[in-house]
Structure formats: C-alpha cells, structure tokens
Image (cartoon, helix red, strand yellow):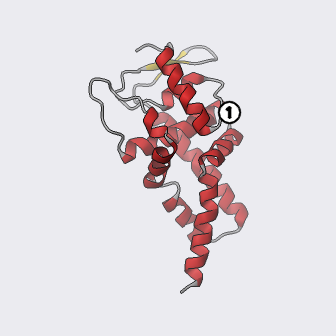
Amino acid sequence: MSGAMDQFAMAKVARLEPIIGYALRDPGVGWEALQVAGSGVISVRQIQGGVRRITHGNKRLAILGDTAINHVLSEQWFNSGDSKAEWTKIREDIASNEGLAQLGWDSGLADLLNVNPMNPVPPTMRLVSDLVEAVIGAVDLDGGIDAVKQVMRTLGLLDQVAQVTLDFFISSNCH
C-alpha cells in the first residue's frame, strides 16, 4: 500500500481520535501508529510533505511513546515527592507491557490495529502495548508533550498514578 491515505485509513484514524480525545493535525502519523509490522503499509504521507517509510510498522513510534509515557509519569511522580519505591510501583503497574495492553483492550484501541490481511493475528499483549506506546508517540510528534499529557489524562493513565500511590501508601502502612 502506498503512502496515500484511503478511506479505510481515514476511517480508522477517525475512530482513534475520540478514544484518545485528541484531533491529530497529521492523520498519517495516527495511521502509522495503528500498523503492525507486516501489515502491508510501507509508508505514510506526511502533512508537511514527503513520505516516511514504515517498514517496521509502529515500532519506531512505540519507542517515542515509551519515552514520552515515562517522561510524563516520572514528572508527575517527581512533583508528588513520593519515594523511589513508589516510582518503581508506578512503572510496574502502569507503564509495563501488561498495564499498557490492558489499557489498549479496555479503551478499544486494540480494535484499531491494522494487521496483515493475509495473515491476521489476534492482538497479543505485546502488539497492544506497542500500539498504546505508538499512539502516544504519534501524539508527541503531532502536538508535543502537552498533547501527550492530555491524551494520557483522557486514557486514564494519570488517574492510575494516584491510585497506585494510594495503594502503595496503604500497603506500606499496614505492615
């Protein structure tokens, strides 16, 4: 498939935006975030012009998203004054593959994965966690860290930090 976004691609991106609570200025980056390696989509047209090759699906965006998620979560943890042990718990519960995959399934993001039509695979934990990270990476490229914070708030990731901190406080004071 070429870099041009067809109606199918536009419809998938249109379904993505309400889930994340953010309107992408560049729908191509949203379409890229939905790609599983081997999906058949090898490039996306960028809104500023040019075409970006995506031979590894959403993997590159997932790396950006992983970094952005950790940036936002660590900033929130730092500002809270919580202990390093609480940071470890936040990372284990929220930013882990398991936590992100659960978010992807619960939010409906997993339904938007674009897989190889000749070999459709069910969305595994790893594919879905990569998807969530890639979507966050796409938002970071599109709108910066403030947009990432907005999307993480919409998806409930920032609320989860408060819950993890509360749970940690309760468990550490019960011993």
Left or right placement of residue 161 versus residue 9 in this view: right
Quarter of the image for residue 140 reads top right
Count every numbered label the image shows and give the total.
Answer: 1
When the figure is inspected, residue 50 is found, relative to residue 119, above or below; the finding is: above
Instruction: Return the x and y of residue 152 as percentages of the image width and height.
Output: 62, 46
Q: Is residue 104 above or below residue 9?
A: below
The x, y position of residue 153, in whole percent, is 65, 48
The answer to whether any part of residue 84 appears in the image is no
Say which quadrant the N terminus sits in. Answer: top left
Which residue corresponds to mark 1? Answer: 143
Rendered residue at 49%/39% (across/down): 109
* Amino acid type assigned to the residue bearing label 1 in the image: Gly
| Towards the viewer: 84 or 158 | 158
Element class at badge 1: helix
Q: Position of residue 131 (x, y in %)?
A: 47, 39
Q: What residue is at 66 percent from the left and 61 percent from the top?
A: 77
Does the image show residue 14? yes
Does 101 sit left or right of 85 as displayed?
left
Residue found at x 46% / y 32%: 112
